[in-house]
Image (cartoon, helix red, strand yellow):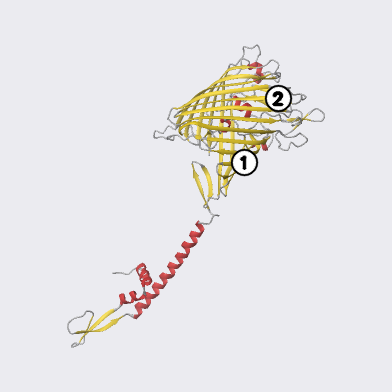
Amino acid sequence: MKLTKLSLAMASLIGAGFATNALALDLYVDTKTQQLFAEPGPGRTKLGSFEKVEDQAAQKAEIEKIKEDLALKSNAIKSLDEHVNDPSEGKLHINEKGIKFESKDGNFDMAINGRMQVDAQMNVQNANTTTGVSPTSSDQLADGSNIRRARLGVEGSFYKDYEYKFEYDFSRGNGTVAAGITDAYLNWKGYSNLGVKIGSFKEPFSLEEATSNRWITFIERNMAVNSFSDNPNAYKTGLGLTWSEPRWTAAGALMTEPVGGGWAYSTSKATSTGGLAGQGNGNNNRNNGSGDMGWEITGRVTGLPWFEDKNKFLHIGASGSERFMPNNLGGGDNRMAYTAAVNSNVDRSNVLNTSTIALGSTLTRMGAESAFIYGPFSAQAEYIQTDISNSSNAANAQYVNGATLQGYYGYMSYFLTGESRAYKAKTGAFDRLKPNRNFDMKGGLGAWEIAAGYDYLNLNSKGINGGEASTAKFGVNWYPHSHFKVMANYIHVLDVQQSAALGFNNRGKAWDGGNLDMFEMRGQVDF
């Protein structure tokens, strides 16, 4: 048998004696002829066992060399194992969740996220010509396309108990760099289901607001949600607490004005001489003597009173907040107004507008929400009300006390390809949809959804003449992949009523009575 290096190495570990005996030769001598033999026989006497000295020395040297090689390999393996277990070393994931880096011990991770929404709007009928007001080009909604949102951010965790997120939207601005900031917070989740969040984050209010704009059914949020939460900027700075259970959630926050303000705010303030000077809205410290910040306390609770499985359940919830705007908030025209477009996505002109609300006002919001999911069918509805009261009058602002603004919406949707809307119990909101089969050239259709809804908003009450509008809308959504979405909406404005006393422009008068029809599209990608 031919001896290999491995067998020699094993022999050396068993014992040198085994190797010596295996290489020894027994010799025998014939007592009559004096001949030598390697085998015993008649008349033969054993002389003894003999070894070839030079071969034995070479074999021992080779065995020693093999031992040295094994020792080196053992050290290399040990070093590699220590390298792998080093917490400073990590790995990179590129999958359907995006680009994520995490350490081997799980103490650190970071993901890059982003989204882009490219919108287009074509107005089939863009003004009412029956009201006696001759519409000009400035009185009409414009056709066109734009980048509705373009966001890039990072999020992750460190030492497992701390989460962070920073996101910037390049399509926002409103005159300040800070206006592009959406999320910028630190969240501690070290105790069971409790979360403690500080920084800039979305206020806990409304089901449709809590649902990311990536997962909403129609291209634009409904008018009441936009007017009472999104336009004033749902991302505010403060301290928040959350508690989540499998069947219910609770969230509350103490917040100040949003980073960068929002569309509902003016962008200038009065000077000491009565003129207007450029003033970037939304500076958290309100410098240049622009006044103190407003504060609000907000809360939301949700529950699943009926839950059969993740595709069959009933969601209900309620939100509430109270916000106080001090008399010296911003000064001059730098105050807040409730505004709304009629579900338009490119020309989002404020068809409804309360004009500026009186300083010193207390704004109390209340909301009720529900959603029913039964396989591919879903229905969702919300009612939101804002009560306004104030302690004193203010120049150039409407004096209101006990005014109530309100709005509601409802819609139904159905997945033709059998999917069901994804729900995230931790936040009490809807989440990313994953098609049963992605689109491909081998028969994969992706996911197809159809939807129809009604939307109503009334911004008229007492001294406030913001207008009233209602719309009907129809939508088709295609999800070729979980990270791609194509949307098409047809919006018919059922009615628009503006007060003759409004006076902030003539556009509302040109639209009075309705007769606006829009076709909208969106292409979306996110990671």
Residue ID at (28%, 79%):
25
How many marks the image carries: the answer is 2
Label annotation for residue 197: 1
- Determine the residue positioned at 47% across, 65% down: 75
Give the mark, 1 or 2, whose residue is nearer the N terminus: 1
Q: Position of residue 430 (x, y in %)?
A: 52, 33
Q: Nearer the viewer, residue 97 or 107?
A: 107
Name the residue: 52% across, 42% down: 98
Secondary structure type for disc 1:
strand
Position of residue 482 measured from the top left corner of the image (x, y, whole percent) = 48, 36
Indicate which disc residue 389 carries: 2
**In this orientation, which residue lies closer to the viewer: 235 or 347?**
235
Q: Which mark is residue 92?
A: none
Query: Could you tell me if residue 495 is visible in this image?
Result: yes
Q: Would you say the residues marked 1 and 2 are in contact, meaning their CB atoms lie under 8 Å apart?
A: no
Q: Report whether 13 appears left or right of 228.
A: left
Q: Quadrant of the N terminus?
A: bottom left
Query: Does 109 sit above or below residue 213?
Result: below
Q: Residues within 10 Å of mark 1 (few under 14, many from 20)?
A: many
* In the displayed structure image, the side of residue 331 where residue 468 appears, left or right: left
Q: Residue furthest left?
A: 42
- The nearer-to-camera label among 1 and 2 is 2
- The quarter holding residue 224 reads top right
Q: Amino acid at mark 1?
A: Lys
Q: Position of residue 490 (x, y in %)?
A: 53, 22
Could you say which is closer to the camera, residue 21 or residue 463?
463
